[in-house]
C-alpha cells in the first residue's frame, strides 16, 4: 500500500489490510502504530487482527486509537512512546493518515521542535490538512488550569497536579504511595516523581487533595504533607466511611471525626488554588464520601465516570449506591459541555494506551453506560456488572491506611508496622 514518508523515523498511511504487514517489514519498518478506533466502518481489520498480523511479520505494534476532535496530551505522549518502543522506523495509520500525522506534529510542538505557526504548512507539505492540530493548540493555549497527569500502572490510577498558570501555584490530587502486596514493601517513587515535577516547573504547592478514601491504592497525602507542609483535604463525609470501616477493622481508638486531614470540604464549598477558584461537588455512589473538584474548565471526577469507552465506576463497596452514582454523574454532566473531565483510573480496554481525559459532551454522546439511559436502566446495568467484578486486590490493605489520611500503621514494639486484614468480614 502507499504511505507518505515524513522523515527517517515515521511514515503515515491510510487503513492497511492485514496482508500488507509483511510488506511493511520488507520495506524496513520496525513497527506499526494503529491510531484508528475499532468499528469506524464495516470491513475494518481492527486492533486484534492488526496485532496478530504485526506479530506474524515480526513488527512491534501499538494501539493508540483517537478521534480527531478529542485528542488529548495522553494520546500524543502514547504515540511518542510507541515510536520509541519500535526501535526503528514506524508506519502509523488511521483511516486516511491525518490523525497519525496530527499526533506526530503535536508531539513536535509540545516538545519545542516545531512552532505552532508551522503546523499547517507542515501538513500541506505532506498532503494533509492539519486544521485539527491547530484547533488543539489554540484551545490548549486558552485553557486554565494546566493539568499534568501521572499514571500509576500497578493500580491503573491517575494522579494529578493542577496549576494556576498565572501564579504558578498548584494542588496535588489523589497521590499514590507505592505498595507491593507480595513483599509488603512500601515506597515513595510515585509521590517523589510528582515532587520532582513541581520543583522542575518552579511551582508552589498549596493543597494535597483526595477525592475519597481509595480502595485500590494507598494515599500518599500524609507523606507529601510531611515533605512539603502543604495542607491536606477531603470531603466531609469521610467521617461516615471512617465509622463504617472502624467496625469492619475493629479499630476502637480510630478517630472518626476526619481530624486526620487539615480540612473537610462540604458540598458547594470553594477554595483557591493561586488565583483560581475551586469548587467542591459532593459525588457519592462509588463511596459515601466521594467529591469532585471543579477548577476552571477542568473537573476531577475520580471514580464516577471513566473515559467513554470504559463506562462508569463500580458501586458495590460498603456504602456504595448505583442510584446515588447516577445522580452524581448527572450533576457532573450538567457542567458546560466543553468541561474537561479527568478520571481517577484507566483500565486500558482492548489493550489501548492509558487515557484519562474526556469532556462532558463526549460522555453524553459516547459512554455506553450513560447514552440513552434513564436512572432505572443505569442502575440495572451497573448492579449487574458489579456482580461480575472481583473486589480490588488491595481493598483491605488500603482502606485501613486511607481512612487515616494515608498514615501507615504505627510501628509495634519491634519497630515494624503491620496491616490488619479482617477475615470473612465482607
Image (cartoon, rainbow, N blue to C red):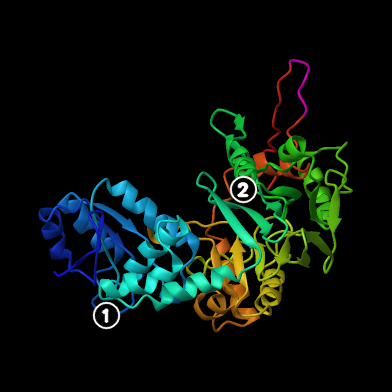
> Residue 250, position in %: x, y?
80, 38
- Dominant SS of magenta comes to loop
> Residue 334, position in %: x, y?
68, 80
- The answer to whether 179 appears left or right of 127 in the picture is right
User: Residue at horizontal 28%, vertical 68%?
Assistant: 46
Please say whether residue 411 is one of the residues in the magenta stretch.
Answer: yes
Q: Residues within 10 Å of mark 2 (few under 14, many from 20)?
A: few
The answer to which image quadrant residue 240 occupies is bottom right
Of residues 15 and 162, the one drawn nearer to the viewer in this rendering: 162
Q: Which range of residues does the magenta coloring cover?
A: 410-414
311 lies above or below 62: below
Q: Earlier in the sequence, mark 1 or mark 2?
A: 1
- The answer to whether 396 appears left or right of 359 in the picture is right
Q: Nearer the viewer, mark 1 or mark 2?
A: 2
Of residues 279 and 238, the one drawn nearer to the viewer in this rendering: 279
> Residue 135, position in %: x, y?
48, 76
User: Residue at horizontal 81%, vertical 44%?
Assistant: 246
What residue is shown with label 1?
42
Please identify the quadrant where the N terminus is shown: bottom left
What residue is shown with label 2?
201
Amino acid at each position: 500500500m502507499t504511505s507518505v514518508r515524513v522523515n527517517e523515523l515515521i511514515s503515515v498511511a491510510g487503513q492497511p489490510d492485514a496482508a500488507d504487514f509483511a510488506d511493511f517489514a520488507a520495506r524496513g519498518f520496525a513497527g506499526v502504530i494503529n491510531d484508528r478506533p475499532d468499528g469506524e466502518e464495516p470491513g475494518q481489520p481492527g486492533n486484534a487482527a492488526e496485532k496478530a498480523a504485526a506479530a506474524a511479520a515480526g513488527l512491534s505494534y501499538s494501539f493508540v486509537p483517537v478521534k480527531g476532535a478529542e485528542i488529548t496530551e495522553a494520546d500524543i505522549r502514547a504515540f511518542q512512546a510507541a515510536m520509541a518502543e519500535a526501535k526503528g522506523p514506524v508506519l502509523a495509520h488511521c483511516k486516511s493518515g491525518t490523525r497519525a500525522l496530527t499526533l506526530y506534529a503535536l508531539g513536535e510542538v509540545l516538545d519545542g521542535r516545531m512552532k505552532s505557526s508551522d503546523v499547517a504548512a507542515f501538513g500541506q507539505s505532506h498532503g494533509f490538512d492539519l486544521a485539527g492540530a491547530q484547533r488543539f493548540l489554540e484551545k490548549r493555549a486558552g485553557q486554565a488550569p494546566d493539568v499534568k497527569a501521572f499514571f500509576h500502572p500497578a493500580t491503573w490510577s491517575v494522579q494529578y497536579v493542577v496549576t494556576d498558570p498565572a501564579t504558578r501555584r498548584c494542588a496535588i490530587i489523589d497521590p499514590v504511595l507505592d505498595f507491593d502486596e507480595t513483599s509488603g514493601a512500601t515506597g515513595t517513587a510515585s509521590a517523589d516523581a510528582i515532587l520532582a515535577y513541581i520543583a522542575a516547573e518552579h511551582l508552589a504547592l498549596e493543597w494535597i487533595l483526595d477525592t475519597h478514601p481509595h480502595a485500590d491504592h494507598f494515599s500518599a497525602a500524609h507523606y507529601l504533607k510531611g515533605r512539603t507542609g502543604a495542607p491536606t483535604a477531603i470531603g466531609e463525609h469521610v467521617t461516615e466511611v471512617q465509622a463504617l470501616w472502624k467496625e469492619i477493622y475493629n479499630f476502637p481508638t480510630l478517630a472518626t471525626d476526619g481530624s486526620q486531614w487539615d480540612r473537610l470540604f462540604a458540598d458547594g464549598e470553594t477554595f483557591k488554588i493561586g488565583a483560581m477558584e475551586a469548587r467542591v461537588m459532593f459525588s457519592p455512589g462509588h463511596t459515601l464520601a466521594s467529591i469532585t473538584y471543579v477548577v476552571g474548565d477542568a473537573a476531577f471526577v475520580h471514580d464516577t465516570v471513566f473515559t467513554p469507552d470504559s463506562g462508569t465506576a463500580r458501586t458495590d463497596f460498603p456504602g456504595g449506591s448505583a442510584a446515588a452514582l447516577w445522580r452524581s454523574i448527572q450533576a457532573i454532566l450538567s457542567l458546560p459541555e466543553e468541561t474537561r473531565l479527568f478520571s481517577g483510573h484507566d483500565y486500558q480496554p482492548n489493550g489501548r494506551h492509558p487515557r484519562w481525559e474526556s469532556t462532558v459532551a463526549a460522555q453524553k454522546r459516547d459512554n455506553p453506560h450513560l447514552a440513552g439511559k434513564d436512572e432505572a436502566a443505569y442502575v440495572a446495568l451497573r448492579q449487574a456488572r458489579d456482580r461480575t467484578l472481583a473486589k480490588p486486590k488491595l481493598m483491605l490493605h488500603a482502606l485501613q491506611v486511607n481512612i487515616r489520611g494515608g498514615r501507615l500503621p504505627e510501628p509495634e514494639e519491634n519497630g515494624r508496622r503491620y496491616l490488619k486484614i479482617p477475615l470473612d468480614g465482607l
